[in-house]
């Protein structure tokens, strides 16, 4: 059973050199089976001028201090990355290049965020819904620019021989965007970006963030893998209508990862959260998302041992 954990690297994630250093330090300490670059969650929004700060969040997330989009016409003003690579994108590409050069034996994954996730970071969910209802032309233009820029980002990572992509969808869940609206908006951005991603990378992992998730597109490329918070009693309701050959990557909830204190208990949890009918082809132990900054190294080692003994 493969195993992959990762953490945010607050402050260090603002520099390509330092993000690479922290990524490699984690890799050398724990030797996960994939090397995942984990930048700040809003790094793409920062490329457009979004202001943020790290204020001690336990997961290492940065806080958006001011929305960039405050008027519907602001969507027309989003930068075109083909006219100039933003500073933060250059830093992420540098981190990818340095990490890839140092890790030749294991695949390196870049992390990006869907156009809709970026739009909500830039404007807030209420404005996105309001603009979709009342100013659809402006929002369409903005999502198109976000999608075109993201395709450029994917090309840039691919040219650095990055093998994998971790594609984050943050609001396809209860309490996020309503299903109907998300699917309409996904057709304007995610379809293009995911098609391009599966062309450029040998593995594409789509992370559906949070609880009570749903699939944001009516059909997904079968080549990609879905990562989500695992349930102890099978698939979440929102994933039960997937095509039978869609590849799944359940992630164990953080509280379960912390609570288990013995190898036997960890093995029992693996059997519970990774049933054969879901993961028999390629079981891969992951957390539901990033680990807390203070997640103990001893717990990571415990789960690594349990994974080695799995089945």
Image (spheres, rainbow, N blue to C red):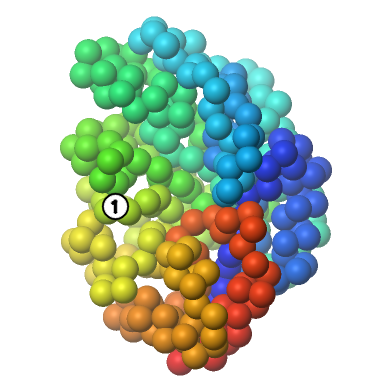
Numbered disc total: 1
- Residue drawn at (45%, 77%) of the image: 282
- Residue 61 visible in the shown view: yes
Residue 254, percent across and down?
A: 48, 63
Q: Is residue 153 visible?
A: no
* Residue wearing tag 1: 213
Residue under the image location 39 percent in, 8 percent down: 71
> Image point 31% across, 73% down: which residue?
232
Residue 85, relative to residue 74: is it above or below? Answer: below
289, above or below 80, in the image? below
Indicate left or right for 24 with 270 as reference. right
Q: Which of the 4 quarters of the picture holds residue 184?
A: top left
The location of residue 16, given as percent across then percent down, is 76, 40
Residue 251 position (above or below residue 138)? below
- Where residue 81 sits: x, y (%)? 59, 24
Q: Quadrant of the C terminus?
A: bottom left
Question: Badge 1 local density, few (<14 within 10 Å), some, or many (20+)?
Answer: many
Residue at the location (68% across, 43% down)? 10
Q: Is residue 213 above or below residue 148?
A: below
The image shows residue 173 at horizontal and vertical percentages of 29, 46
In the rendered structure, the answer to whether residue 134 lies left or right of residue 310 reads: left
Q: Which secondary structure, mark 1?
A: loop
Decide which of 97, 286 is in the foreground and name it.
286
């Amino acid at each position: 059973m493969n195993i992959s954990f990762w953490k945010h690297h607050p402050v260090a994630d603002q520099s390509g050199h330092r993000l690479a250093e922290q990524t490699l330090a984690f890799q050398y300490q724990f030797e996960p089976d994939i090397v995942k670059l984990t930048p700040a969650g809003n790094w793409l929004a920062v490329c457009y001028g979004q202001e943020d700060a790290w204020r001690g969040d336990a997961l290492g997330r940065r806080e958006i201090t001011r929305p960039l989009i405050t008027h519907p016409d602001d969507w027309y003003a989003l930068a075109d990355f083909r006219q100039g690579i933003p500073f933060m994108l250059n830093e992420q590409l540098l981190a990818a290049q340095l990490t890839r050069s140092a890790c030749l034996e294991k695949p390196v994954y870049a992390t990006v965020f869907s156009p809709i996730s970026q739009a909500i970071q830039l404007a807030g969910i209420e404005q996105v819904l309001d603009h979709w209802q009342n100013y659809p032309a402006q929002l369409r233009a903005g999502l198109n620019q976000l999608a075109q820029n993201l395709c450029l980002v994917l090309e840039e990572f691919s040219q650095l021989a990055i093998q994998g992509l971790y594609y984050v969808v943050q609001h396809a869940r209860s309490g996020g965007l309503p299903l109907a609206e998300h699917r309409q908006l996904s057709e304007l951005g995610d379809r293009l970006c995911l098609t391009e991603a599966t062309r450029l990378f040998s593995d594409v992992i789509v992370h559906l963030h949070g609880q009570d998730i749903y699939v944001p597109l009516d059909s997904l490329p079968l080549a990609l893998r879905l990562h989500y918070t695992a349930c102890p009693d099978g698939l979440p309701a929102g994933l039960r209508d997937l095509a039978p050959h869609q590849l799944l990557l359940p992630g164990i909830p953080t509280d379960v990862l912390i609570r288990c204190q013995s190898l036997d208990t960890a093995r029992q949890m693996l059997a519970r959260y990774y049933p054969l009918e879901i993961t028999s082809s390629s079981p891969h132990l992951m957390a539901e998302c990033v680990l807390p900054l203070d997640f103990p190294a001893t717990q990571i080692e415990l789960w690594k041992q349990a994974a080695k003994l799995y089945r």
